[in-house]
Image (spheres, rainbow, N blue to C red):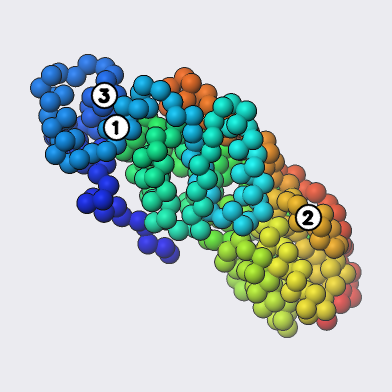
């Protein structure tokens, strides 16, 4: 498990530390900095003295946000090389531009410390809101952000944080995986492998749940050596599929939790002279541009990328205009897109 980022207070002073220095609540500091609500003159003085003593730069940002919008939004994604995030970024940028907003794109490489540094940068630039795409299930940076900047609009795209008051736009990953598995099971497959991404991401965790649920309902035991978590990269799909397909009891089907992973599965199967779908059925997830380029064309789960990205911006713009922080969760349901990479298994299915 990755180490969570811990701030260096000598570099970045937060509103929480100002509150501690002034011996008041965070909400009181926020009221003073934003000049909203009633605060006694004595308390105001304590807060402003603490701001000056700690050289709290966030106060400048808060004042700027109070006076006018910067018409900029931060978009934090894990990996721009992943075609899913490329498509998502384009959708978000186009819809944001239509509302007069520009996007600061931040690519974290799945690194929590890098994510934290980007958050500090975005706050310093005075962005009007931040969209997080596919954060880790236990992302302390988001918790800290909401604690220190409770009035900043935040939208989580592709994840859930039940304990925090923020907006969430998610796809039903469990349902998508369940549909993928149901398709393979209906075709007669029982030896179905799972190649997931990072085990700390919401998508991987939820899609694994759907995988297990489908097998359990059919009375099929989950084989631990058929379940692999790694990354969402093509190379991960290739390396892990190659190991699986060289086993004596290799699977007859593979559920890849992203189309990128499925591309790697195709590469491994080709090197091992295993024909898709005659000797190996493959189902992906996302219905990205890869799906129709691959040969045979990939059966996959369609994630409504465009609709999710557009909805995230609409929620963000509404939150900024109305200056109201609420918790709204929008759930999209994925669909199975059946193409050419799967087929029914016969009694004499050729594994070799």
**Distance between the alpha carbons at the discs numbered 1 and 2:** 48 Å
Q: Residue 224 in the image: state x and y as whole percent.
A: 60, 71
**Distance between the alpha carbons at the discs numbered 3 and 1:** 14 Å
On the question of residue 219 being in view, the answer is no
Mark 1, residues whose alpha carbon is within 10 Å: few (<14), some, or many (≥20)?
some
Check the picture and name the quadrant holding the C terminus. bottom right
**Distance between the alpha carbons at the discs numbered 2 and 3:** 51 Å
Q: Which mark is residue 60?
A: 1
Asked which quadrant contains residue 281, the reply is bottom right
Q: Which mark is residue 31?
A: 3
- Is label 2 in a helix, a strand or a loop? helix
Check the picture and name the quadrant holding the N terminus. bottom left
The first of marks 3 and 1 along the sequence is 3
On the picture, is 35 further left or further right than 247?
Answer: left
Q: Which mark is residue 291?
A: 2
The residue shown at (59%, 41%) is 170
On the picture, is 220 further left or further right than 27?
Answer: right
- Is label 1 in a helix, a strand or a loop? helix
Mark 2, residues whose alpha carbon is within 10 Å: few (<14), some, or many (≥20)?
many
The first of marks 1 and 2 along the sequence is 1
């Amino acid at each position: 498990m990755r180490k969570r980022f811990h701030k260096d207070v000598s570099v970045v002073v937060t509103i929480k530390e100002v509150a501690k220095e002034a011996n008041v609540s965070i909400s009181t500091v926020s009221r003073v900095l934003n000049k909203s609500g009633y605060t006694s003159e004595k308390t105001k003085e304590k807060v402003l003295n603490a701001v000056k003593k700690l050289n709290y730069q966030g106060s400048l940002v808060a004042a700027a946000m109070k006076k006018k919008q910067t018409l900029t939004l931060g978009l934090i994604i894990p990996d721009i090389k992943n075609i899913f995030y490329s498509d998502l970024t384009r959708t978000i940028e186009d819809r944001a531009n239509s509302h007069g907003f520009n996007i600061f794109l931040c690519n974290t490489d799945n690194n929590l410390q890098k994510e934290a540094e980007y958050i500090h940068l975005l706050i310093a630039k005075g962005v009007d809101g931040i969209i997080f795409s596919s954060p880790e299930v236990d992302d302390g940076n988001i918790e800290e952000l909401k604690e220190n900047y409770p009035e900043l609009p935040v939208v989580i795209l592709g994840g859930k944080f039940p304990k925090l008051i923020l907006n969430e736009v998610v796809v039903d990953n469990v349902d998508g995986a369940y549909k993928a598995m149901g398709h393979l099971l209906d075709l007669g497959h029982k030896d179905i492998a799972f190649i997931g991404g990072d085990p700390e991401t919401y998508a991987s965790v939820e899609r694994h749940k759907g995988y297990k649920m489908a097998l359990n309902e059919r009375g099929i035991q989950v084989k631990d050596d058929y379940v692999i978590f790694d990354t969402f990269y093509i190379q991960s799909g290739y390396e892990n599929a190659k190991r699986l397909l060289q086993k004596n009891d290799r699977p007859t089907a593979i559920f890849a939790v992203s189309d990128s992973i499925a591309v790697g599965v195709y590469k491994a199967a080709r090197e091992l002279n295993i024909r898709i779908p005659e000797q190996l059925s493959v189902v992906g997830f996302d219905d990205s541009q890869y799906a129709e380029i691959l040969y045979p064309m990939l059966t996959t789960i369609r994630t409504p990328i465009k609709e999710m990205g557009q909805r995230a911006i609409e929620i963000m713009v509404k939150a900024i205009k109305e200056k109201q922080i609420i918790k709204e969760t929008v759930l999209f349901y994925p669909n199975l897109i059946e193409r050419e990479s799967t087929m029914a298994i016969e009694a004499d299915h050729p594994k070799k």
